[in-house]
Amino acid sequence: MFLPTWAIALPVTYLSEPPEDLSGETFIDFTELIPIPKPIAPNVLCNCYAYLKKMYAPALPTTATIRANLKATGAVGNVIVFYYAAVGLPHYAFIIGETATTWTIDEANYVSCRQGTRTVPKNSGSITGYYTL
């Protein structure tokens, strides 16, 4: 019977110590080059405000302070505040992009306990204002 060379098992040799001193060598730490995202805890994904605080602004003020200091115009890097009457609660998201007529936002809990990105019209009746970080 013929076996291809890749199918032949070779003996394995284990070293009891490194073959040479490698202390002067330079190595690349690939963890610095390729960021590995850390999982987001469910208690953060299930709360839009907690998500903003965790991902974008650890010093984000309270929701009452945000609502008391809303501006009429927004920009990329601002918090956008919505009010959805069907739910009866405000919703907070982070503006990550824009066109002449839309905002692209990053948010959590618009879909229950999930992070997502969506595009909303700048003239949406659900927008109550913007908060500058």
Image (tube, rainbow, N blue to C red):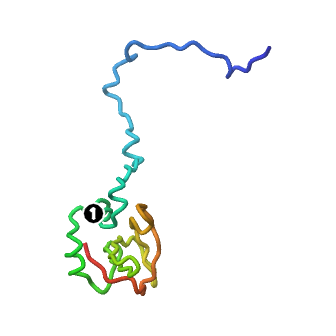
Callout 1 crowding tier (Cα within 10 Å): few <14, some 14–19, many ≥20: some
Report the number of discs: 1
Q: Quadrant of residue 75?
A: bottom left
Q: Picture coordinates of residue 66 (x, y %)? A: 23, 76
- Left or right: 130 with respect to 114? left
Q: Residue furthest right?
A: 1
Question: Which quadrant holds the C terminus?
Answer: bottom left
Left or right, 131 with respect to 82, comes to left
Q: Report x, y in % for residue 62.
A: 21, 70
Counting from the top left corner in percent of width and height, residue 78 is at 31, 74
Q: Taking 115 as reference, is 15 above or below it? A: above
Residue drawn 30% across the image and 87% down it: 72
The answer to which image quadrant residue 15 occupies is top left
Q: Amino acid at mark 1?
A: Lys
Residue at 20%, 69% in the rendered image: 61
SS label for mark 1: helix
Q: Nearer the viewer, residue 101 or 66?
A: 66
Residue drawn at x 53%, y 14% as measured from the top left: 12
Locate residue 16, reporting x and y percent: 39, 12
Front one among 52 and 84: 84
State whether residue 26 is above or below residue 69: above
Residue at numbered disc 1: 53
